[in-house]
């Protein structure tokens, strides 16, 4: 179940009030990308950072996205300073037809969770402008993203990262190892799968909020000083909602993205094409 306790909703309002009275203290905004411009900024940042790391090759569009980004229920999060996107990450919900991006390497491990009837989401496509965004800002954004993902109606939050980054997630976001280290040929780098038990985490957060009061909930240290929260995020927290379909893609934008993509990098199976054409009337692939 989502985080719906009155204490939790009250604290979300407390954050809003604090931001309203002290906006100068928040350097960044934590938000869901809600327009084509923000999506393109996120895909551009993802491309630049992955290119710099040697994970991908140059392309003329200077954008990087996956076929899962085209699904209506995929949600792209960004950290912004004024109009500039400094960090991004994507939440993909599991589906019987299309699975998750990390199925490429960890289908067996994810399959065991599915066999237990567990609902899964994956956090993927993380990138940050390390010249403009501080290390502490990146860490706060990552933790806020994880905490917000607990509002999705899922049992497990999974992520696939370079092993050198695993300690950050196990220490700050309570992830544990899901699968052994493997080589991810797509980005020419090692990867390791991590999992957080969302049900257990929500229970711990509720217990902590009940025992210590709303002012001690996990958003306090991060969101109340460094980040403001967009209205969509605040509304979901205050109302205890499961996030709805928040992908702002349209048929025209999907069409534009597909014309820029390298066919060797963005393989669309027949069932994917049919689904997209149904979801975005007028789309021609």
Image (tube, grey):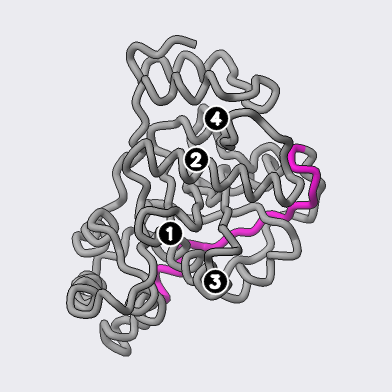
User: Percent position (x, y) of residue 135?
Assistant: 58, 72
User: Percent position (x, y) of residue 239?
Assistant: 19, 60
Q: Mark 3 or mark 1, which has the lower sequence index?
A: 1
Decide: few, some or many residues near mark 2? Use Cα within 10 Å; few <14, some 14-19, many ≥20.
some
Residue that carries the numbered disc 4 in the rendered image: 67
- Left or right side of 69 for 281: left
Q: Mark 1 or mark 4, which has the lower sequence index?
A: 4
- Disc 2 is placed on an element classified as loop
Q: Mark 3 or mark 4, which has the lower sequence index?
A: 4
**Could you tell me which quadrant the N terminus lies in?**
bottom left
Which residue is found at the position 49% from the left and 53% from the top?
88
Which residue is found at the position 21% from the left and 64% from the top?
238
- Disc 1 is placed on an element classified as strand
Residue 94: mark: 2
Camera-near label (3 vs 4) is 3
- Give the quadrant of residue 64: top right
Query: How far is disc 1 from disc 4 in space, using C-alphas?
Result: 23 Å
Residue 79: mark: 1
Q: Which stretch is magenta?
A: 186-205
Decide: few, some or many residues near mark 3? Use Cα within 10 Å; few <14, some 14-19, many ≥20.
few
Query: How far is disc 1 from disc 2 in space, using C-alphas?
Result: 24 Å
Q: Nearer the viewer, residue 191 or 77?
A: 77
Tell me if label 1 and label 4 are in contact, CB under 8 Å.
Answer: no
User: Percent position (x, y) of residue 47?
Assistant: 61, 42
């Amino acid at each position: 179940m989502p985080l719906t306790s009155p204490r939790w909703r009250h604290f979300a309002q407390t954050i809003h009030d604090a931001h309203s009275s002290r906006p100068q203290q928040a350097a960044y905004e934590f938000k869901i990308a809600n327009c084509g411009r923000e999506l393109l900024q996120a895909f551009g940042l993802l491309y630049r950072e992955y290119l710099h790391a040697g994970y991908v090759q140059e392309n003329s569009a200077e954008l990087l996205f996956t076929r899962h980004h085209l699904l209506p229920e995929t949600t792209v999060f960004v950290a912004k300073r004024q109009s500039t996107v400094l960090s991004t990450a994507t939440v993909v919900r599991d589906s019987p037809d299309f699975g998750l991006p990390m199925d490429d390497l960890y289908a067996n491990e994810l399959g065991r969770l599915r066999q237990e009837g567990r609902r899964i989401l994956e956090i993927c496509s993380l990138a940050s402008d390390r010249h403009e965004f501080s290390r502490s800002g990146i860490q706060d954004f990552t933790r806020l993203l994880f905490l917000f993902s607990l509002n999705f109606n899922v049992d497990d939050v999974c992520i696939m990262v370079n092993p050198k980054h695993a300690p950050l997630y196990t220490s700050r976001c309570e992830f544990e190892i899901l699968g052994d280290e493997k080589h991810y040929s797509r980005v020419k780098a090692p990867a390791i799968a991590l999992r957080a038990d969302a049900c257990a985490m929500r229970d711990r957060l509720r217990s902590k909020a009940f025992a210590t009061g709303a002012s001690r909930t996990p958003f306090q240290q991060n969101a109340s000083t460094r980040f403001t929260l967009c209205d969509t995020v605040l509304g979901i927290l205050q109302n205890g909602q499961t996030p709805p379909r928040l992908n702002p893609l349209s048929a025209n934008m999907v069409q534009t993205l597909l014309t820029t993509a390298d066919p060797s990098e963005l393989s669309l199976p027949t069932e994917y094409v049919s689904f997209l054409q149904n979801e975005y009337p007028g789309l021609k692939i």
